[in-house]
Image (cartoon, rainbow, N blue to C red):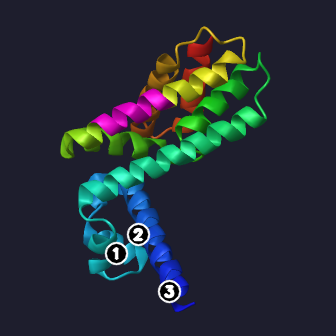
Amino acid sequence: MVQRTEQARAASKREAILRAATQLMLREGLRGVTHRNVAAKAGVPVGSVGYYYSNRDTLITTCFESIHARRVERAENVMADPPAPADAQAVARAVIDIVSAGHPSLLMGFFAACVDAYRETGADSSSQLKRQIAGTAELLLALLRGTEFSSTDPHEAMAALVGATILFSHAERDPVAASERAVIAVLR
């Protein structure tokens, strides 16, 4: 019984660290993901971060893996109740929902973290991100197959989403609405 309680506490602490690191990554970029910042946000001792995640690259890689797992879950949810095949706005919203892992307001942070990861982390992290981008394209392809927009290249839809998010985030406009319009333009 004591061992199960300790295992549950350890799992809870590990999850709190991952959640805190992911939130910092999406709000502050990778520069915000330090052992000290993560520990403070998670409410754990600094040493716990290093105990559960051997180094910063491992923690960051795990953050990206967690986001991608949520992206797959969102795709499964969307596919369980797909948008109307001819409804470009609903399809665009589904694309944004999948790419953002259900958090459209955090898209800019995610894209910035990806750019940071390509610059800062090792080849393993970069190749993992490339695999996740390819996996996201496959999820979008599955979504688009059931619509009249099936000839749309999912990479073009993602590019429109990235470009609009970045451009309109800096223009102090609503990047989600702009991203939706950009994806709709690619669908047509």
Horizontal side, residue 177 vs residue 39: left or right = right
Disc 2 + disc 1, Cβ < 8 Å: yes
In the image, farthest residue toward the bottom: 2
Q: Amino acid at mark 2?
A: Ile
> x and y percent of residue 107 in the render?
48, 42
Q: Is residue 73 visible?
A: yes
Foreground mark, 3 or 1, reads 3
Q: Which residues are magenta?
A: 127-135
**Mark 1 neighbour class, 10 Å CA radius: few under 14, some 14 to 19, many 20 or more:** many
Of the image marks 3 and 2, the number of the one nearer the N terminus: 3
Q: Quadrant of the C terminus?
A: top right
Q: Amino acid at mark 1?
A: Ala
Q: Name the N-terminal-most of marks 2 and 1.
A: 2
To which quarter of the image does residue 77 belong? Answer: top right
Q: Residue at x 48, y 73 (%)?
A: 11
Mark closer to the observer (3, 2): 3
Q: Which residue corresponds to mark 1? A: 39
Determine whether, in the image, residue 23 is placed left or right of residue 138: left
Q: Write down the residue under mark 3.
A: 3
Say which quadrant the N terminus sits in.
bottom right
Q: Residue at x 61, y 14 (%)?
A: 187
Where residue 75 sits: x, y (%)? 63, 36
Report the residue at 38% width, 81% height from top.
Answer: 44
The residue that label 2 is drawn on is 17
Q: Position of residue 119 (x, y in %)?
A: 20, 40
Main secondary-structure element of the magenta-colored stretch: helix
Percent position (x, y) of residue 139? 57, 29
